[in-house]
Amino acid sequence: MSAPEPLQPTSLPDAVNGWPSLRDAARVGIWRHRPALGLPAGIPEISLGEGHTPIVPLQRWGAAHGLPRVLAKLEYVSPTGSFKDRGAAAVIAVLAWAGVDAIVEDSSGNAGAAMAAYAARAGLRARIFVPESAPAAKRDQIAGYGAQVVAVAGTREDVATAAEHAAHAPGVAYASHARHPAFVEGTKTFGLEIAAALADDPPLHIVLPVGNGGLLLGAFKAYGELAASGHRVSLPRLHAAQTTACAPLAAAFAAGAEAPLSVQAQPTVAGGVAVGRPARGVEVLAAIRASGGSAVQIDDGTARRTRAELSRLEGLDLEYTSAVGFAAASQLRTSGVIGSNDRVLIAATGIGLKDAGV
């Protein structure tokens, strides 16, 4: 596989004018943060209204897990049902501006749906490569946007290889959510929103399910650039949640390694984090350590119980991949990494309807 394009720092507007300098109320979606986005000037603003997702307290679930100050950011209310819409809006806008006719993408489901939807919005053809194990609900959603769905046998890496080969055709671009730098520029808005909304009482911890790590890197990039521009922010401790069936980052973190460790992925209900060789794994591990965070593993049984508990106690409809993040927060509280009165934010990354029948 080819190496991902490097992430470049973006110079944000100076903090002298405060948070308004980072937003443009006349725009929609991630483009409301256009002054803070490191994207080419003049590109089309392709949007379905993504971003600006609610942040809600979880009083009942938090009380049950010793987390009285826990919040959830409901990324699953995004247009296609996951946080991937933030990055897809940016990637598709860049590719449409570059004049491509079609895109290919590899995905366990959510990124494929997001890229297919935004490609449709931009008038581009899409071909999405998915694992044979991808839930039928996710495949059907992708196909519903007019994309061609190609199921690939083998590992998640086999799927990525097939997509990259298909991108060699004339007029076709590889819209990789794992490799294209614009994806992280889009997910950066997740961090910008948290920093602005919780400026008076910021979270000490952010817990996220991590496969390729695009959302974690977006949060890390946001806080770093805010600090560099003079905003009074403190980088939260970033915690990556993985499944025991596939935990190359958590294993590397525990071993003190700088790069993801080689693992043999096993079947799991949390397909969104079943990435054996994360393309930006070195960057993800560096971001976790720079923030003072951690990486933990959650088994499928715990993910199932956590999903059911959050639905019953809080009315949250999460996919299993999202439930892994909440289970990790509970585990980190039990181990003492998260203190009894620490403010914690957990990313509710994808909607449970996509895992119907799993």
Image (tube, rainbow, N blue to C red):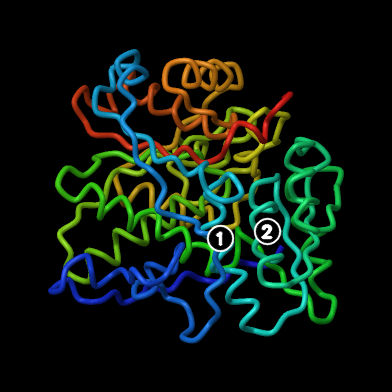
Instruction: Give the quarter of the figure containing the C terminus.
Output: top right
Residue at coordinates 53% horizontally, 22% vertically from top-left? 307
Residue at coordinates 59% horizontally, 61% vertically from top-left? 88
Q: Is residue 105 left or right of residue 293?
A: right
Q: Residue 28 falls in which quadrant of the image?
A: bottom left
Identify the residue at the far front of this view: 26
Q: Position of residue 115 (x, y in %)?
A: 66, 60
Q: Residue 63 falls in which quadrant of the image?
A: top left
In contact (CB < 8 Å): disc 1 and disc 2: yes
Identify the residue at the far top of this view: 64
Q: What label does residue 117 carry, if any?
A: 2
Q: Position of residue 58 (x, y in %)?
A: 34, 26
Q: Position of residue 258 (x, y in %)?
A: 46, 51
Q: Nearer the viewer, mark 1 or mark 2?
A: 1
Q: Tag 1, which secondary structure? A: loop
For marks 1 and 2, give the CA distance. 9 Å
| In the rendered image, the vertical position of residue 147 relative to residue 46, given as above or below | above
Q: Tag 2, which secondary structure? A: helix
Residue at coordinates 48% horizontally, 83% vertically from top-left? 40
Judging depth in this view, the residue of 17 and 179 nearest the camera is 17
Q: Earlier in the sequence, mark 1 or mark 2?
A: 1
Three-letter amino acid code of the residue under disc 2: Ala
Q: Residues within 10 Å of mark 2 (few under 14, many from 20)?
A: many
Q: Which residue in the protein does label 1 denote?
A: 48
Judging depth in this view, the residue of 160 and 148 nearest the camera is 148
